Image (tube, rainbow, N blue to C red):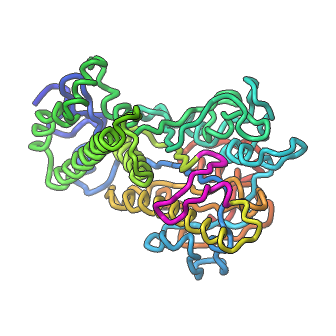
Amino acid sequence: MSDHLHVSATRLNRRTVLKGLGTALALPLFDAMLPMRARAAGAAAVVPPRRMAFIYVPNGVHMPDWSPEKDGADFDLPATLAPLAAHKDKMLVFSNLAQDKARANGDGPGDHARALATFLTGCQAHKTNGANIHVGVSVDQVAAQQVGHRTRFASLELGVDRGAQSGNCDSGYSCAYSSNVSWRSPTQPVPKEIDPRAVFERLFGGAARNETAAARATRQKQKLSILDFVREDANSLQRQLGGADQRKLDEYLTAVREVEQRINRSETAAARELPKFEQPDGIPKEHEEHMRLMCDLLVLAFQADLTRVSTFMFANAGSNRSYPFIGVPDGHHNLSHHGGDAKKQAKISKINQFHTRQLAYLIDKMRSVKEEDGTMLDHSMVAYGSGIGDGNAHNHDKLPILLMGGAGGTLRTGRHINYEKETPLNNLWLSMLDRIDAHTDHLGDATGRLEDL
């Protein structure tokens, strides 16, 4: 076995990686990474890390198909939440959370840009389409600043829509507000990555410090796998592991390879189906496949402890994407101004359900990854929602907000909680920060922690 595996007679170093020609592949937490005496006693000396992810959907939702009628555990899932039925026990549905700073507060139109800029910050965005953008630090970056040093990447920002960082995108608001949910500082957004190939290379090929750009291009052109370069180390490590760890390693490497193959297929299909157009590498032609690849990459990043903080924009603020593959050829933003038209509302609900199906896919994946005394989902928090309630009303109270996961057993899930009107959404963010040891008492317009979590 090569020296860099750092295997001793007693334990495997927790920061072990598989190395090959210019490539280093991170690994999940194994039993062999626990101290020998802890393993002998059957105790888990290393607690699985806690993670947090924030998922944003634009244009609000059709609230009658979102809001449960009953409070507490005895609630039925409305149509939009029905795709999450298998995970009701891991769900918290919140009613009456608000983002006051997404309101105009004297700044006139521009609700979509404000809703996104404020969603994770709780701060009023300075209305400008110039370079003097200003909003606040987002909750994910507060977490990244406090716990990001524990992982290779402090945070991971994902999306599926391209977005400009300048110009006027919403009634005098900069495109930076419409394209970014994550803010490192009040004036510095953290751009999302929409190309699955780029994300994969960043996570798994990015540690290839000796691999030149030309070599990487050759590897991708020849469809060589990252795993081809670490196979010798993987085989050596496999012989050193116990049965449970062998299965965990095999499942993890299989998942990495499956995502890699799907990215390869998406690139080939895009080039074949539209040969007259230059296609962006790695971005699938099929929208749902694009979203699910990003979900898989997020899970892999958590599984290998490459990051513990992520954001995922299902679409940009005010997105007018159409969804003909689910029978909705109309633009999403146009439909959100439904004016009470029942047919338009039905189409909005179909889009909303499409998005919650993608959330269900992500939660399925997280729940399938076994960790110590539970699953990845048991040790994680996934917040999902929008900075707009009803798209037609452009309201910023009664927001559609979910929280999935157990946060290491610190959440009592399987409930619908109805808070007092105008309860700041940032109170939820403070409560989540506490659960990953990233404490702060000040975040936007937060007034405290949410009770009864």
Determine the image quadrant of residue 284: top left
Answer whether residue 259 is visible to the viewer in this image.
Answer: yes
- In the current view of this chain or complex, which residue is farthest to the right? 106
Q: What is the x, y in percent for residue 174?
A: 72, 33
Q: Residue at x 18, y 54 (%)?
A: 247
- Left or right, 295 with reference to 177: left
Taking depth in this image into account, of 257 and 94 the one nearest to the observer is: 257
Which quarter of the rendering shows the N terminus?
top left
- Left or right, 128 with reference to 20: right
Q: What is the x, y in percent for residue 204?
A: 31, 34
Q: What is the x, y in percent for residue 269?
A: 30, 44
Would you say residue 332 sits in the magenta stretch?
A: yes
- Find the magenta span and give its range: 316-335
Q: Which residue is drawn at 47% across and 54% down?
A: 380
Q: Is residue 32 above or below residue 330?
A: above
Q: Residue at x 80, y 35 (%)?
A: 127
